[in-house]
């Protein structure tokens, strides 16, 4: 029997002989896998809740008011800036984006939503996948996103009631749902899109705001004729249009309030979960090696090489880890089917694959100490003959 076949035989034979013990370790690895995958899904879900609208924005640059530090709620752009941006050479189109928060009270329970004002067919307004776009001007029409539809059960053709605080009192406005767009969450809330004039009429306002009927967008979404000229167009806009700041989409997302801190927290949790996995797997296999020192001594005494013993230990770790990761992935998939849409979980294929690869790597990493120890065992000392 060649050394590789011998190593495979020894590894699988021991797993089968002590299958109860190894099955329990596989369950532990499965639970670690479940935790890692859910943390990854939670991180992606929370990120989507903050950035989904911005990430899918049909634009390459975002224009802010100067001194707003790329924070959308802190920015307010004049209509003159919109006209100036549209005149800059290289700008294909620019659309206003108005943001605020209101409450839909016609659902049970009421749902907080991001009310976004945008011009149809301009950057900032997503593509409608069902129904039609709202009419321009001060219409009582709205387009909802899929997240709101899933949470509320509202569909195209229904009417919703929106409550907003204006001055000293709360007011309720009725909107006809005429269209549906894909998931467009913003600031952890589903979104409703309306025309800028409608947004200005129904958004929360102070008493001073009530005297001004001109809608002022928070930012401008700018689509370029040549997206490859991102840096040069950013410099051109700053040079030709006064009193603005310009950022790309990635910078805009990273400056969403709380986004960076939130992602750092989730990533730290994922890192420590993987570290715990390394320690658990390493500790188990180290105990395994200590318990079978005489058997390893016998194998070496009858001619087994250090390479064969080490390879058998590595194969054993890989097989048990693969069993645990496979079972944990299946369990994660089954559990994910039962979560309601209100839970911010998003199982991204790439992130899940990277997490599984990381879990497969931590198995051999965790058992590396036990492999080295097994290779260094002296036959005579293991058999207590020296």
Image (cartoon, grey):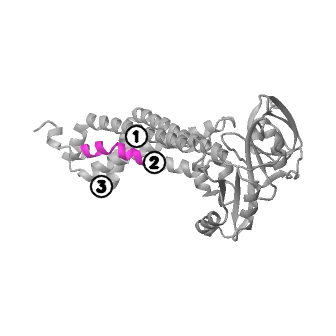
Which is in the foreground here, disc 2 or disc 1?
1
Q: Quadrant of residue 340?
A: top right
Q: Secondary structure at mark 3?
A: helix
In the image, which disc is placed on residue 291? Answer: none
Give the CA distance from mark 2 to mark 1: 11 Å
Write down the region rendered in magenta. 359-373
The reply to whether dot 3 and dot 1 touch (C-beta < 8 Å) is no
Quadrant where the C terminus is found in the figure: top left
Q: Secondary structure at mark 2?
A: helix
Instruction: Say which residue label 1 marks.
Output: 275
User: Which residue in the structure is indicated by mark 3?
Assistant: 3
- Residue 191 lies, with reference to residue 3, above or below; the image says above
Q: Earlier in the sequence, mark 3 or mark 1?
A: 3
The percent coordinates of residue 82 (x first, y second) are: 74, 59
How crowded pointer 2 is (Cα within 10 Å; few <14, some 14-19, many 20+) is rated as some
Picture coordinates of residue 166 (x, y %)? 80, 34
Pointer 2: what residue?
358
CA gap, disc 3 to disc 1? Answer: 33 Å
């Amino acid at each position: 029997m060649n050394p590789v076949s011998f190593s495979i035989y020894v590894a699988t034979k021991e797993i089968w002989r002590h299958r109860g013990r190894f099955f329990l370790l596989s369950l532990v690895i499965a639970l670690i896998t479940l935790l890692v995958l859910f943390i990854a899904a939670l991180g992606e879900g929370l990120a989507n809740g903050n950035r989904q609208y911005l990430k899918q924005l049909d634009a390459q640059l975002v224009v802010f008011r100067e001194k707003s530090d790329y924070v959308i709620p802190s920015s307010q752009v004049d209509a003159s800036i919109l006209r100036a941006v549209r005149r800059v050479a290289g700008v294909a189109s620019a659309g206003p984006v108005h943001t605020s928060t209101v409450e839909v009270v016609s659902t049970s329970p009421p749902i907080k939503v991001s009310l976004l004002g945008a011009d149809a067919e301009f950057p900032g307004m997503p593509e409608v996948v069902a129904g039609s776009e709202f009419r321009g001007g001060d219409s009582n029409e709205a387009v909802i996103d899929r997240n709101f539809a899933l949470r509320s059960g509202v569909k195209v053709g229904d009417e919703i009631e929106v409550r907003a605080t204006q001055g000293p009192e709360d007011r309720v406005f009725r909107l006809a749902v005429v269209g549906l767009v894909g998931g467009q969450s913003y600031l952890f809330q589903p979104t409703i899109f309306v025309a800028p004039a409608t947004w200005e009429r129904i958004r929360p306002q102070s008493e001073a705001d009530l005297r001004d009927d001109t809608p002022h967008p928070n930012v401008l979404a700018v689509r370029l004729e040549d997206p490859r000229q991102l840096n040069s167009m950013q410099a051109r806009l700053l040079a030709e249009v006064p009193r603005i700041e310009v950022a790309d989409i990635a910078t805009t997302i990273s400056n969403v309030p709380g986004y960076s801190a939130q992602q750092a927290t989730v990533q730290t949790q994922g890192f420590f979960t993987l570290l715990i996995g390394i320690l658990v797997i390493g500790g188990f296999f180290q105990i395994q090696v200590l318990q079978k020192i005489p058997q390893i001594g016998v194998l070496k005494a009858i001619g087994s090489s250090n390479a064969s013993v080490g390879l058998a230990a590595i194969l054993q770790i890989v097989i048990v880890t693969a069993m645990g990761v496979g079972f944990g992935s299946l369990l994660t998939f089954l559990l994910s089917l039962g979560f309601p849409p209100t839970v911010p979980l998003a199982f991204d294929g790439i992130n899940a694959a990277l997490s599984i690869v990381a879990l497969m790597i931590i198995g051999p990493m965790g058992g590396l100490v036990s492999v080295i120890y097994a290779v260094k065992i002296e036959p005579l000392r293991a058999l207590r003959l020296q």
